[in-house]
Amino acid sequence: MEELEQKTIEATLQDEALALIFVHSPFCGTCHLARQMLTTIEATFGQEIFWEFNASLHPDLMKKYQIESVPCLLVTEKSRLIEKVYAFHSVTNMYEKVSNYVKE
């Protein structure tokens, strides 16, 4: 999982044809569980497929994408919102969601 840099976050998202972005807070216990699920999914795909950012440090992006809570998985295409996922039920459930966008 690659951290989005403060200075280049907008440009990075604009350049990415498809971006899966994990939005979290270091004070959120559920976020830590969600991170473990996404790390397992990355291991299954054998590559880094997620970007991440700390919600507390990016209020502008929270507003832009109307993120209501964390953890959240944003799916964007050239910065345009495709989907927001708030419910991280299980690794299997998240794998199925991610597989709609990323092929092994």
Image (cartoon, grey):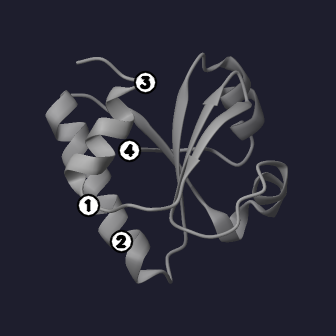
**CB of mark 2 within 8 Å of CB of mark 1?**
yes
Instruction: Tell which of 48 and 93 is nearer to you.
Output: 93
Mark 3: amino acid: Tyr
Is residue 42 shown left or right of residue 66?
left
C-alpha span from label 1 to label 3: 20 Å
The residue tagged 4 is 1
Residue at image coords 26%, 61%: 36
Measured as percent of width and height from the top left, residue 38 is found at: 31, 50
Q: Which residue position holds label 3? A: 101
5 lies left or right of 25 = right
Q: Nearer the viewer, mark 2 or mark 4?
A: 2
Q: Which of the two discs, 1 and 4, labels the residue nearer the N terminus?
A: 4
Q: Quadrant of the N terminus?
A: top left
Question: Are the two marked residues, 1 and 4, in contact with CB atoms closer than 8 angstroms?
Answer: no
Circle 4 sits in a helix, a strand or a loop, which is it? Answer: loop
Which quarter shows the C terminus? top left
Q: Which mark is residue 36?
A: 1
Residue at left offset 34%, top offset 60%: 35
Q: Secondary structure at mark 2?
A: helix
* Circle 2 residue: 32
Note whether 40 is above or below 47 in the view shown.
below
